[in-house]
Image (cartoon, rainbow, N blue to C red):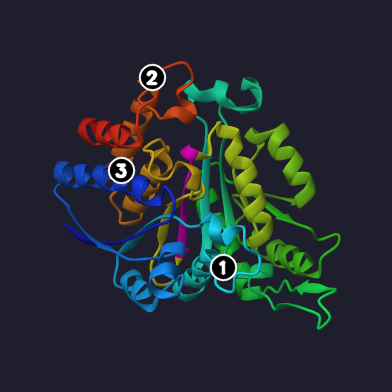
Amino acid sequence: MDFKIGVLAGDGIGPEIVEQAIKVMDAVGAKFGHNFNYTKALVGAIAIDETGDPYPDATHQVCMDSDAVLFGAIGDPKYDNNPAAKVRPEQGLLGMRKKLGLYANIRPVTTFPSLLHKSPLRQDIVEGADLVVIRELTGGIYFGARGRSEDLTSAFDTCVYTVEEIERILRLAYEYAGKRNKRVTVVDKANVLASSRLWREVAQRIEKEYTDIETDYMLVDNAAMQLIQWPKKFDVMVTENMFGDILSDEASVITGSMGLLPSASVGRETSVFEPIHGSYPQAAGKDIANPLATVLSAAMLLESLDLLEEAQAVRDVVNRSIDAEVVTVDIAGDSKAYKTSEVGTWLAENL
């Protein structure tokens, strides 16, 4: 089968890690008889440098024309350290989410037995942890009205949600829970925020349609604590944009390395698959970044194309690479540290 894949490598280590994922996808194509046609496009700081726009129209068209999009990372110190910058790489990411209707970010968090010692939490706490954080991605405070007073002594950011936006993300969470352990935790701040009270009101109505799934409700501060104390109690966690941004990053630490966790952003037009970590500019060009999260994001991409056996083959070879200690410096410990490109080549050859 033929598939059109948009490739937005982005900034920092993005091009290096995406290159390894493409190696693995090409190996999948050779093994299973598929042809992946890649179209590269600019996004983030590199797009600003070359076009003045962090998400150019040409890049949007590539995404629209693709069956799925493989995304690297965005961000550059020259913008991160300049709060007065009028155009920022992150604006490209938000623009892409809005234009493609990427309304849900899916972040699976699983532990690897051979890496439990890398987790900052005790082994008995994290062993067997397996959860999914589903974050609403196109509403809330990141997309609400914002500004400064004329005298610049105050600022405001507005959090707005509609019933339709909340229903959509909740139904997706219940669909995921139905295929997993049939538990949904709705996270909000309903004791303080009106928008959260709307979330809870809608959720309490929706849960009645899914009688085979257990639903519980948790305030965000309590969820942040329990995620560290008892990560194994969670199955599917669903929440609004800002809470999901924070909690999913917190959850990522459980595994021992952010370089291991993939994500998918599900949209109306197409879906985007990317590692959860940032552009790590300090490592750019050094061939030391961990590519496994990007490779596992490619597995999620394959799954979205109904290539289930192919996706599992990628996950299996990643597990074998970890067991064989063919890993980069961030998780190598006292063992040999492999280069980014070496890990990618090993995965492709052993798939």
- Identified by mark 1, the residue type is Arg
Q: CA distance from mark 2 to mark 1?
A: 46 Å
- Viewer-nearest residue: 67 or 59: 59
Q: Main secondary structure of the magenta part?
A: strand
Q: Which residue is mark 2?
A: 336
- Identified by mark 3, the residue type is Gln
- Identified by mark 2, the residue type is Lys
Crowding near pointer 3: few (<14 within 10 Å), some, many (20+)? many
Q: Are marks 2 and 1 in contact (CB under 8 Å)?
A: no
Q: Farthest residue to the bottom: give it.
A: 150
Q: Which of disc 3 and disc 1 is earlier in sequence?
A: 3
- Viewer-nearest residue: 238 or 81: 81
Q: CA distance from mark 1 to mark 3?
A: 34 Å
Residue at image position (60%, 37%) is 253
**Residue 67 bears which disc, if any?**
none
Is 114 magenta? The answer is no
Instruction: Name the element at disc 2.
Output: loop
What's drawn in magenta, residue-wise?
259-266
Residue 211 showing in the rendered view = yes
The percent coordinates of residue 48 (x first, y second) are 45, 69
Instruction: Name the element at disc 1.
Output: helix
Q: Which residue is mark 1?
A: 168
Q: CA distance from mark 3 to mark 2?
A: 19 Å
Q: Which residue is mark 3?
A: 20
The percent coordinates of residue 29 (x first, y second) are 18, 47
Crowding near pointer 2: few (<14 within 10 Å), some, many (20+)? few
The answer to which quarter of the image holds residue 317 is top left
Residue at image position (85%, 74%) is 153
In-image side of 75 versus 141 (left or right): left
